[in-house]
Image: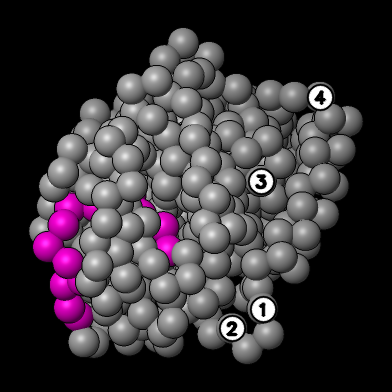
Amino acid sequence: MRKIFIFFTFLFITLSFASYSITVKAASNENPGLKTTVVADSYNSIRSSLLKNERTGQFDSAEVSYTQVDALIQKVVRENPEILYFDSAMSWSNGDIEFSYSLPVSTIKKNKAALSKEVDKVLAQIIKPGFTNFDKVKAIHDYLVLNVAYDYKNFQNNTIPSDSITAYGALIKGVAVCDGYTKAAQLLLDRLGIENYYVDGYGNGGQHSWNLVNLNGQYYFMDITWDDPVPNVKGTISYKYFLASADQLRKDHKWNEADWPIAKSKTYSFLNDFGSMIEFKGHYYYSSISDKDTLYRVKKDGKSKQKVNNVKAPYFAIIDDWIYFSNYSKGGFLYKMKIDGSKPQQLNSIHSVNLVAVNNQLHYTDSKTKKVLKLTIK
C-alpha cells in the first residue's frame, strides 16, 4: 500500500496585540465545503477512535478523498471538545490512519475522567432551577471569566503547555489560552444541549478562537477570552464580547463567515457596553465602555438606561444599598454612594483598584504597593 498523505498539527501560537489573546491553531477551515452529512461514516469512525484515544483509525476511501482527510480530522477535533491532546495523524490511501497524542494515553484517559466529573460539578454549581438558556449561557461565560486565568506567562516564555489549549486546562487547572476557554464553553454548552459552535479566525490580526451560540433561534458570538482581563483581575468581568452580533465582532475579529450561521441579531447589544457589571435588584449596574467607565444602570431587558452618577468608576462593588467605587474622576480614590447615585463620600486617599465584595467586607488593592486591603462594612 502507498502512503499518500501526511498531516501534522503544529502549534501556531500568536499574540493579539490589543488584548493579549493567543490561540493554538489546531483546526483550520481549509475545506469549508466538506459536509459532515456527506462523510458521516468517516466522520463517526474518526471521532470514535479519537474519543477512545486509539492509535489507529479508519476513513472510508470511497467516501472521502485523501485530500479531504486533513480537513475532516480537524473538523472532528474542532467539534468535539472531549477529544484531548490530539497531536498529529498519518493517513494511507487504503483508509488507514495513525494517530499521535501529546501525552501518554493512560494520562489522557485519567484527565478525561476528571474533566467529565468537573463538568458535572460546575454545572450543578452554576445552573439554577428556572434558568432560561440566556441565564445558562451567561452563567457559563461568567464562571469561566472568574475562574480561569489567561496563560500569559507561558506565552511570554514560549512554553504553552498542551493543557492550556484544552477544556481540561481551563476547568481543572484554571489556566488556558483562547482554545481552552472556547473548548470549555463548548463542552459545558454541549452538556446543556444548547446549540453552539467553535469558531476559529483572527482577532486583531492574530489567530484566535471563540464561540457561537443559538438563543431563541438567533445566533450570537461569545469571546470569553477577550472578556477576561489580562493580567487576571479577581472578580472582574467584561461583556464587550458577550452575545455580540457579527457587526459588533467585525470591528476587531475576522473569520470565514460562510462557514458558520449568521449572527445578525442585536437583541443583547446593550450588554456589549459593559466594561464591568453587577446585577442588583433587577438592574445591571455597569461601567460604560462607550462613556469612559461612567457608571450607569439599565433594566435586565435593556430598557430604562440611566446614568447613576457622573463619575468614572472602572472598579466597583455593591454592598447592601451602597456602591463602593474607585473614583477615577478623583484620583482613583475609594468612594461610596447610595445606589441611586446620591451621597457620594470619600473613604481614602489611595488609588484603589480591583474592588470585590466578600460577605461584609470590601477587598481592594492599593495600585502602588499592590497590597490587598480590607474594609469592614458595618
Is 56 or 129 nearer to us in this picture? 129
Which residue is at the front of the view, 36 or 230?
Answer: 230
Q: Which residues are magenta?
A: 305-318
Q: Position of residue 358 (x, y in %)?
A: 58, 53
Asked if residue 198 is among those painted magenta in the image, a careful observer would answer no
Q: Does 270 appear above or below 310?
A: below
Sequence order check, earlier mark of 1 and 4: 4
Whole-number angstrom distance, CA of label 2 to CA of label 1: 6 Å
Residue 131 picture quarter: bottom right
Q: Secondary structure at mark 4?
A: loop
Label 1 belongs to which residue?
128
Q: Label 1 vs label 4: CA separation?
A: 37 Å
Please name the residue that numbered disc 3 is placed on.
Answer: 171
Q: Is residue 307 placed above or below 375 in the rendered structure?
A: below
User: The residue under label 4 is which amino acid type?
Assistant: Pro
Which amino acid, mark 3?
Answer: Leu
Q: Please name the residue that numbered disc 2 is placed on.
A: 131
Residue designated by label 4: 104
